[in-house]
Amino acid sequence: MTLLLRELRLRNYRNFAQLDLRFPAAGAAIIGDNGSGKTNLLESIHYLEIFRSFRGAADEQLVRFGAEAFHVRGVFEEKDTARQTEITAAYEPRTRRKRVTIDGAEVDRLGDAIGRVGAVIFSPSDVEIVAGGPGERRRFLDIVLSLNVRGYLDALQRYRHVLRQRNALLRIAHANDDLAAWDGGLVDAGSTIIVARHEWVRAHADRYAAVYAAIGGGATSSMSYDADVDVGEDVTREGAAAAFAARLERVAQRERERGITLAGPHRDDLALRMQTSDGLVDLRQFGSGGQVRTAAIALRVIEAESVREARGFRPLLLLDDVFAELDPGRSRRILELFGNETHGQVILTAPKESDVLLDRTGGESLVAPLERWRIAAGEVRT
């Protein structure tokens, strides 16, 4: 199935006071200077996929300065049937209320609305997935798995709730006897997370290496799951639960001394390494800018393929100034990974027209036949 973004309406979102757009089936290339609102526009579309900023901004920061609330509306159409779905999101800082609707009906739980669009965003900030701390890579895993693995989001939310309660108890003297009441919930939700992460990484490790090599012209990189809880060969919920419970017992004394939970998937990492003459080394520590960027793009490619595999969607690709810092060879190899059968619409941004041309001198287009739109100061000229 391919979902096409047909209409987008923004009210008081970031630097857009008011914006109404109708998108062609193929998508659009949006050209404009830095600071004109290109990334904000893509962010608003992706907001309708996960109902939070892909840049990690709080909802309050998305409200246009001086406005009381923001509102985003998208109309999506199934390519084969022409059936349309309307998704809206609004946030009012004064009441701290977020309202999400599907075809006019307000959803009770955000989890019921997440993942309806099948959008994947590629952004220069993706380098932080590779170059940043473990939290950045856990966030990547959590978003991918929440969107594509049934039950993961619920387990993640339960885990985070129990973890907060357990940490609060650990900070209180003489409250350790109450920890047992929370340990069961922590282990139950945590084991679901551990198994899902193990299975996703194992299923996609070879493909990640192949994509990295394809983009990097034969360079070698690997992806593996660096789990805080070692489950060995027993990658089942039962095996993970037993290993997690045993680890909690081993660190119990240190937890009481430090007042914080020291074991669990909140301490995991996604290990990304590259091959050198000295063997495999950490990309975060030793990778060049180009190698880090290649790894980040490879992860997004895998995310897009996960959408197609798990949900049957041809993903909507949102490309935010992806090609500006890449040579034409890498740009071409990236686009070759996305044949017509693997993705739906493409909506991309670039600071200048030449950034979407393979030879940068007015030659072959990277993404023909996309319409070229212009953006300046929060206004789009189609």
Image (cartoon, helix red, strand yellow):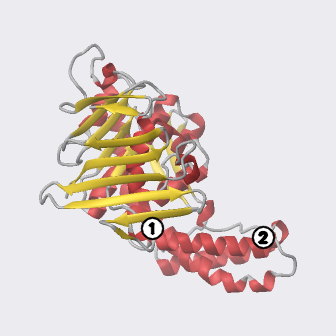
Locate residue 241, reporting x and y percent. Answer: 56, 79
Which quarter of the figure has residue 26?
top left
Please identify the quadrant where the N terminus is shown.
Answer: bottom left
Q: Is residue 198 visible?
A: no
Residue at 43% x, 45% y: name it. 43
Please identify the quadrant where the C terminus is shown.
Answer: top left
> Does residue 255 sit above or below 73 in this rendering?
below
Residue at 27% x, 22% y: name it. 358
Q: Which mark is residue 210?
A: none
Q: Which mark is residue 255?
A: 2
Q: Earlier in the sequence, mark 2 or mark 1?
A: 1
Name the amino acid, label 2.
Glu
Badge 1 element: helix
Left of 24 or right of it: where is 20? right
Mark 1 Cα-neighbour bin, 10 Å: few <14, some 14–19, many ≥20: some
Locate residue 284, reporting x and y percent. Answer: 57, 40
C-beta proximity under 8 Å, tags 2 and 1: no
Q: Nearer the viewer, residue 317 or 21?
A: 21
Name the amino acid, label 1.
Leu
Residue at 20% x, 21% y: name it. 364
> Does residue 18 sit above or below 71 in this rendering?
above
Locate residue 85, reporting x and y percent. Answer: 26, 61
Q: Which mark is residue 110?
A: 1
Q: Is residue 200 visible?
A: yes
Left of 262 or right of it: where is 33? left
